[in-house]
Amino acid sequence: MGKTVFLMILLMLIFMFVGNEIGGYEGMKTAFWAAGGMNFVSYFYSDKLVLKQYKATEVKEKNAPELYHIVRRLSEQAGLPMPKVYIIPEQVPNAFATGRNPKHAAVAATQGLLDLMTPEEVEGVLAHEMSHVRHYDILTGSVAAVFAGAITLLANSSKRNTQNSRGGLMGIVLMPIAATIIQMAISRTREYKADEGAAHLTGHPEWLMSALSKLDGYAKSNQMQRANRQTAHLFIVNPFSGIKGNFASLFSTHPATADRIARLEQIRRYIVENK
């Protein structure tokens, strides 16, 4: 919760600074109220905004029984409330979790994940997402996505401000700030922790290891249609893995898949040795 409050305060300060640079006192005042509204929306509705962006559809047990049963089993094993379950109409396999707390959590999987992965691999992926829910990563990740999107819009607006040269300069500066906010909020260590949590939750680290290998391969050769860099950190693997260049790495929040698999292999060996 501390990171989330920090992000909200930081967003307000950035908006007020840019507002003052572009429109003076009146601009700063307008930016203050805009940031306040954004804080309210990001806390209570960030999960809904992200799910809507990806056109995710909520499913019940009768619509997707196998997926629903996996999530229910994992939630019971983790001692968590049953989250809402969504399917994203996207053929590239991937998944994420969102929500402001475990009682208001949602787990979303792409159709490609269900079509291209074995049930065991799907369970490994969803166990990773349930670990994010258990570790309370989901609120910070969802809020950071909304904030980065808002700052990106602000940067684009500043670039179009031809009446004020400082506005154009601010537009250039703000994009790295949006990336930095995500980097500050979303530590790469959280992915390692979620991987470890998934390994212990299922008791089969090899399920997630196999899934990560496949997910990485698909992400490098295919790009999700609706993915954007402001929400890429939410997914289990970066949907922009196949894009090279400084701008792509600027928003990178995922550790290397090979490193994740290597750590899971260590956990697998430990589990085997201690059976």
Image: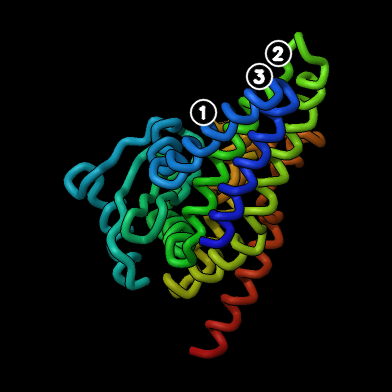
Residue at which label 1 appears? 226
Q: Secondary structure at mark 3?
A: helix
Pick out the residue farthest to the top.
Answer: 163
Residue at 40% x, 59% y is 123
Of 214 and 170, which appears nearest the observer? 170
Residue at which label 2 appears? 160
Of 31 and 274, which appears nearest the observer? 31
Residue at 76% x, 9% y is 163
Residue at which label 3 appears? 157
Q: Looking at the image, tell me whether mark 1 or mark 2 is earlier in sequence order.
A: 2
Q: Residues within 10 Å of mark 2 (few under 14, many from 20)?
A: some
Q: Residues within 10 Å of mark 3 (few under 14, many from 20)?
A: some
Residue at 63% x, 23% y is 26
- Note whether residue 70 is visible: no
- Note whether residue 226 is visible: yes
- Where is residue 260 drawn, in percent x and y? 65, 62
Q: Are marks 2 and 3 in contact (CB under 8 Å)?
A: yes
The label nearer to you, 3 versus 1, is: 3
- The amino acid on which the numbered mark 3 sits, given as a three-letter code, is Ser
Pick out the residue farthest to the front.
Answer: 25
Q: Secondary structure at mark 2?
A: loop
Distance from Cα at disc 2 to Cα at disc 3: 5 Å
- Where is residue 269 drawn, in percent x and y? 60, 80
Q: Is 79 above or below relative to 32?
A: below
Distance from Cα at disc 1 to Cα at disc 2: 25 Å
Distance from Cα at disc 3 to Cα at disc 1: 22 Å
Residue at 59% x, 41% y is 232
The label nearer to you, 1 versus 2, is: 2
- The amino acid on which the numbered mark 2 sits, given as a three-letter code, is Arg
